């Protein structure tokens, strides 16, 4: 799925290894995936962008072929701050001190934190089908809780969600992807096989739960500290979302990001569900090419 891309495993410190692929030439662009996927979610987009950019697709810590470290009691191990620092170091080791970052789902939350913690590294920020984490928690109502039930299930104390998911990981994964995807056959069997191989282990299931536990605790603390200090995103921001997904139906995506940014915010909806890179890759490529140029 990534012909012409070279695989790399990079030691970013603290015993963490990040798996990535790199291809193309031109200005550097880092693509970050979401839950419950891995870098493979970009397989329809990355080759197209690589015609004009140097494209790096990486697995977040806890996902895919990247390290899945033992979590700390405060979940800091899987904070977006820690996950963002991993990816900044990946780019530094690849020779890129400043770059654009595109994040879908969890990757968008990592990219948001990266833009705040490492403004000198992030030249442009694109978030795909998310509103800011704190904004979404604060706006919780019945409709949101029903569609984003996993936000409240995965944060339950260890090892309740781990045991339930671990009883039948393939069923959980298939149902999760099916329920969030609004475009038939968008997720190929080849991609699903890769997702299942990466997700189907106790370590992966636990790590991904910790990602969400961090989002409901230490990540909110970091966000609140930025709000109190008046910190805003300084890089230009692009927001893309699926019109048929929860973000498109329940949030004013542009307004939520304008509230977090001191720079220009632009964006649009595409006619799809949550898995934008796989449901409408052509539309997303067109959006990103315009923004990244």
Image (cartoon, rainbow, N blue to C red):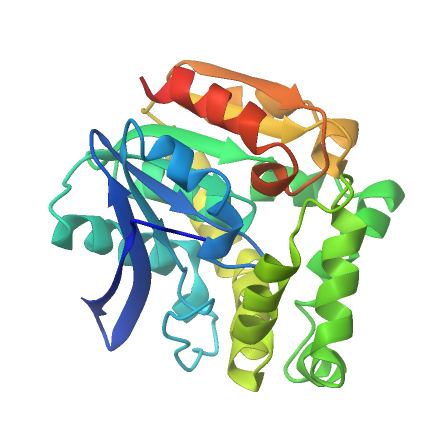
Apparent side of residue 119 relative to residue 67 in the rendered image (left or right): left
Residue sitting at 86 percent across and 50 percent down?
A: 146
Farthest front residue in view: 3
Residue sitting at 47 percent across and 72 percent down?
A: 74
Rendering coords of residue 214 (x, y %)? 52, 63
Rendering coords of residue 47 (x, y %)? 39, 39
Residue sitting at 59 percent across and 60 percent down?
A: 190
Q: How many labels does the image show?
A: 0
Residue sitting at 47 percent across and 67 percent down?
A: 63
Viewer-proximal residue, 35 or 52? 52
Vertical placement of residue 53 versus 155, above or below: above
- Residue 292 falls in image quadrant: top left
Viewer-proximal residue, 161 or 243? 243
Viewer-proximal residue, 115 or 26? 26
Viewer-proximal residue, 267 or 53? 53
- Residue 26 falls in image quadrant: top left
Apparent side of residue 236 relative to residue 266 in the rendered image (left or right): left
Rendering coords of residue 158 (x, y %)? 63, 82
Rendering coords of residue 224 (x, y %)? 48, 43
Instruction: Answer whether residue 36 is visible to the viewer in this image.
Output: no
Vertical placement of residue 192 versus 160, above or below: above
Instruction: Answer whether residue 244 is visible to the viewer in this image.
Output: yes
- Residue 80 falls in image quadrant: bottom left
Image quadrant where one finds the C terminus: top left
């Amino acid at each position: 799925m990534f012909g012409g891309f070279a695989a790399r495993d990079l030691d970013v410190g603290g015993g963490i290894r990040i798996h990535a692929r790199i291809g193309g030439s031109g200005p550097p662009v880092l693509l970050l995936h979401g839950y419950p996927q891995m870098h493979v979610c970009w397989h329809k987009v990355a080759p197209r962008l690589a015609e004009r950019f140097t494209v790096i697709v990486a697995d977040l810590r806890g996902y895919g072929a990247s390290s899945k470290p033992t979590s700390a009691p405060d979940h800091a191990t899987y904070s977006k701050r820690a996950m963002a620092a991993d990816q900044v170091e990946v780019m530094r080791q690849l020779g890129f001190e400043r770059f654009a970052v595109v994040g879908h789902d969890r990757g968008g939350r990592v990219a948001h934190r990266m833009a705040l913690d490492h403004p000198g590294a992030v030249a442009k920020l694109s978030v795909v089908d998310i509103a800011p984490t704190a904004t979404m928690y604060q706006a919780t109502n019945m409709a949101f809780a029903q569609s984003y039930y996993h936000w409240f299930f995965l944060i339950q104390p260890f090892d309740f969600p781990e045991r339930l998911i671990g009883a039948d990981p393939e069923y959980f994964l298939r149902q999760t992807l099916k329920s969030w995807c609004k475009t038939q056959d968008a997720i190929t069997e080849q991609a699903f096989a890769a997702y299942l191989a990466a997700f189907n282990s106790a370590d992966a299931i636990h790590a991904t739960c910790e990602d969400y536990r961090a989002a409901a605790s230490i990540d909110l603390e970091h966000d609140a500290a930025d709000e109190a200090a008046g910190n805003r995103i300084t890089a230009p921001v692009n927001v893309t979302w699926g019109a048929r997904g929860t973000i498109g139906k329940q949030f004013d995506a542009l307004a939520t990001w304008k509230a977090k940014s001191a720079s220009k915010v632009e964006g649009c909806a595409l006619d799809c569900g949550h898995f934008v890179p796989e449901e409408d890759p052509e539309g997303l490529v067109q959006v990103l090419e315009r923004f990244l140029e």
